[in-house]
Amino acid sequence: MAQTHDHEIVSIYPFSDEEVDQLMDNSQECVLMWATKDGWPVGVTHAFLWHEGKIWITFAVHRHRAAAIRRDNRVSVNVSSRGYPEGASDDLPGGAITFKGTGEFFDDDETKAWYYAALSKKLNPDSPEGEAFFNNLLDSPLRVILAVTPVKKIMYNGGKAQAHMAGAISEDELGERLPVDKERMNAERAKRGLPPR
């Protein structure tokens, strides 16, 4: 099969819904991003949980990010396969997703109880002692929980890209070429006197 890969076109490498769940259930860390009062973008790495289509994160309520997100709840979260634990299956999807979403805070005992237990189990799947220690560590009166509801996914399926570059998958296995890789890319190519693609 002839190679048709163009390194400037990456929107054609999405994840399936099943692959999204696999990446989100197995990666152990994400980067939460928000805007400060003066407009600076900031990001911090967190452990997280993927639950009912939302990204759940916790941190102390006195952190600047809590005030910033209460002021403007539009956030982004990046999750990469680089966050898989050591020894993770080679069958898990590789790549990354950035989610644009809206944040909602939870501070009730019921949410804290299930979330602390679930996150502790995720990060310590083979260690009841580690699970109990981490759960106890999380149980702090200053801690708050943020649930991010995605409104858009920006995906890069590294396995699909690699297979495409090697000529190992057909064009009908690729995703739709999004406007950024059609109109916007070709507008930039035209500015530089390059032919459209």
Image (tube, rainbow, N blue to C red):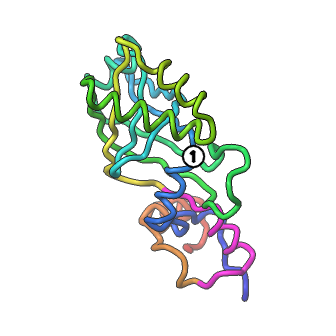
Of 48 and 139, the residue lying toward us = 139
**Residue 34 appears at what percent x and percent y?**
40, 29
| Magenta region, residue range | 155-170
Disc 1: which residue: 27
**Residue 4 appears at what percent x and percent y?**
67, 79
**Residue 176 appears at what percent x and percent y?**
45, 73
Which quadrant: the N terminus?
A: bottom right
Side of 141 where 135 appears, left or right: right
Of 23 and 38, the residue lying toward us = 23
- Using the rendered view, name the quadrant where residue 67 is placed: top left
Which quadrant: the C terminus?
A: bottom right
- Residue 21 to residue 115: above or below: below
Side of 76 where 79 appears, left or right: right
Which residue is rendered at x = 24% and y = 24% of the image?
108
Side of 72 where 50 appears, left or right: right
Q: How many marks?
A: 1
Which residue is rendered at x = 52% and y = 33% of the image?
47
Does 154 appear in magenta? no
Does 158 appear in magenta? yes
